[in-house]
Image: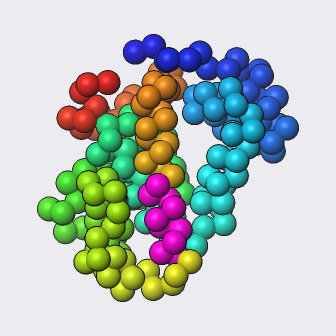
Amino acid sequence: MKTRLELVPLEEARRLGRELGIDDAQASRGAFRMLAHHPDLLRQVFGLLTMLATRNKLESRLRELMIMRIGWTTGSDYEWFQHYRIGKAQAGLTDAEFIAVRDWRYSEIFSAADRAVLAAVDDTREHGRISDAVWAECEKELREPAVLVEMVVAIGNWLMFSQLLQTLRVPIEAGATPWPPDGKAPAAAAHF
């Protein structure tokens, strides 16, 4: 499916990336090239992404599980594809965990902390907020106020990214196989 807006040309995106201290590999990705239409917005968005990914208080593993759940439940192939790579390389997630996150309530491989943040994602997607019962589980497992606040912001951030990626129809990289590790797409992706 064609993007709704053309991606900013690769060389322009890389130049802007260097200006912002972002390496060429990241500046070459579709999401960056789409946001590069609005350099000031790009600067702010990537500031938040950088903070959540490199100065995070929430465990990277939990963040990546949350993002994968968001990607799956919203049908965002770009988000799933990118964070499959990040989840494996930076958070040590396994293919079994990626597959299980699709229907996590029926899996026994997740810890109590994993289950709490996955429930927080589902609550937010379904109700626009985290219920008292799920919040109590998150509080029990994550304990620190800063971690809990970051969890809420991270869920909102990657829900916003899913919406942005799908609305603007940002494609995954050419030659990439969608929905790794097994190519199975969620029903939510069928209409895009």
For the C terminus, the image quarter is top left
Provide residue 41's location: percent of width, then percent of height.
Answer: 69, 40
Residue that appears at 51% across and 52% down? 157
Residue that appears at 85% across and 38% down? 19
Provide residue 75's location: percent of width, then percent of height.
Answer: 32, 37
| Residue 110 vertical position relative to residue 139 in the rendered view, above or below | above
Provide residue 178's location: percent of width, then percent of height.
Answer: 37, 30
Q: Foreground: 168 or 68?
A: 168
- Using the rendered image of the protein, determine whether residue 122 is visible from the camera's viewpoint: no
- Total numbered labels placed on residues in the image: 0
Q: Residue furthest left?
A: 106
| Residue 132 vertical position relative to residue 161 in the rendered view, above or below | below
Left or right: residue 165 versus residue 180 is right
Residue that appears at 28% across and 57% down? 127
For the N terminus, the image quarter is top left
Q: Is residue 121 magenta?
A: no
| Picture quadrant where residue 143 is located | bottom left
Left or right: residue 10 versus residue 29 is right
Q: Residue furthest right?
A: 19
Q: Foreground: 1 or 81?
A: 1
Q: Foreground: 86 or 149?
A: 149
| Residue 35 vertical position relative to residue 92 in the rendered view, above or below | above
- Using the rendered image of the protein, determine whether residue 188 is visible from the camera's viewpoint: yes
Q: Main secondary structure of the magenta part?
A: helix
Provide residue 167's location: percent of width, then percent of height.
Answer: 44, 28
Q: Foreground: 108 or 117?
A: 117
What segment carries the magenta color?
147-156
Q: Is residue 151 magenta?
A: yes
Residue that appears at 25% across and 35% down? 188
Left or right: residue 119 versus residue 162 is left
